[in-house]
Image (cartoon, helix red, strand yellow):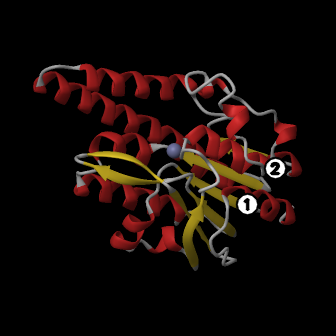
């Protein structure tokens, strides 16, 4: 049994700053994603699950269509397991409606002209992200209790909320503590993995050009995101 806690935009420097033991586990570090032209979520998770750089395949129709991309099970590392559960992962099993709603609200926020309107949209955007998080969190904790040889839960909260609130340290710390608490429920071998981190652009957040990993069973050094597929196969 091996569990992957896939956290979008978990930032290495914040995990260090907030000093969260479950996110750090026994070994932790940054991933090297410099082979990619840009730190795009769909490209990075696609590359993780297939063990190959899928930047060209994901961007074949440009950025716009990339969120429709879905990899068949047999092209992913998950096919090596007997009873895998993969929750809400972009490019595989994610709730597209929930993620579309976030992107529409984000767009509306930047298009809104007055502060009152912006603040209303921000609240709606944040509570939407927390609602979705609660659903995935409960599904994940339930999956951990089930009879599975592989469980992956994908958590978008730090990315979604971070884009509009990265300058709000109190809110970001609350989110990181929540993610740390989720990892505390996992038993057996665990990998925590992010696609990219996040850097401040004023009050907002943008993707940083390295990811984060941690593990309770191996020091991966500075791995590529495509290196984890082989590790997962060796655990079957
Ligand atoms: Zn991402």
**Disc 1 vs disc 2: Cβ atoms closer than 8 Å?**
yes
| Residue that mark 2 sits on | 77
Q: Quadrant of the C terminus?
A: bottom right
- Viewer-closest of 8 and 208: 208
| Residue that mark 1 sits on | 228
Q: Tell whether circle 1 marks a residue whose Cβ is less than 8 angstroms from ligand 1.
A: no
- Viewer-closest of 62 and 43: 62
Nearer-N-terminus badge (1/2): 2
- Residue 92 visible in the picture: no
Where 46 falls versus 224 (above or below)? above
**Residue 187 occupies which quadrant of the picture?**
bottom right
Specify whether 149 is left or right of 5: right
Residue under the image location 60 percent in, 25 percent down: 62
Q: Quadrant of the N terminus?
A: bottom right
Where 4 falls versus 43 (above or below)? below
Q: Tell whether circle 2 marks a residue whose Cβ is less than 8 angstroms from ligand 1.
A: no
Residue under the image location 68 percent in, 40 percent down: 55
Residue 26, percent across and down?
58, 80
Residue 94, percent across and down?
61, 33
Where 30 falls versus 136 (above or below)? below
């Amino acid at each position: 049994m091996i569990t992957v806690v896939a956290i979008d935009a978990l930032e290495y420097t914040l995990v260090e700053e907030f000093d969260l033991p479950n996110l750090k586990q026994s070994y932790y570090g940054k991933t090297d994603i410099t082979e990619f032209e840009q730190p795009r979520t769909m490209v990075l998770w696609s590359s993780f699950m297939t063990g190959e750089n899928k930047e060209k395949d994901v961007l074949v129709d440009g950025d716009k269509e990339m969120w429709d991309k879905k990899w068949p099970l047999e092209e992913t590392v998950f096919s090596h397991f007997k009873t895998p559960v993969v929750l809400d992962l972009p490019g595989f099993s994610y709730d597209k409606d929930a993620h579309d709603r976030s992107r529409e609200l984000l767009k509306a926020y930047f298009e809104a002209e007055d502060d009152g309107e912006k603040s209303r949209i921000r609240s709606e955007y944040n509570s939407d992200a927390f609602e979705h998080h609660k659903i995935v969190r409960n599904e994940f904790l339930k999956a951990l209790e089930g009879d599975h040889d592989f469980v992956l839960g994908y958590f978008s909260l730090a990315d979604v909320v971070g884009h509009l609130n990265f300058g709000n340290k109190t809110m970001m710390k609350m989110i990181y503590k929540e993610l740390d608490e989720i990892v505390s429920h996992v038993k057996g071998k665990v990998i925590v993995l992010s696609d990219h981190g996040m850097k401040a652009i004023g009050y907002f957040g943008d993707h940083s050009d390295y990811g984060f990993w941690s593990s309770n069973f191996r020091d991966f050094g500075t791995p590529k995101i495509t290196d984890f597929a082989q590790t997962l196969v060796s655990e079957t």
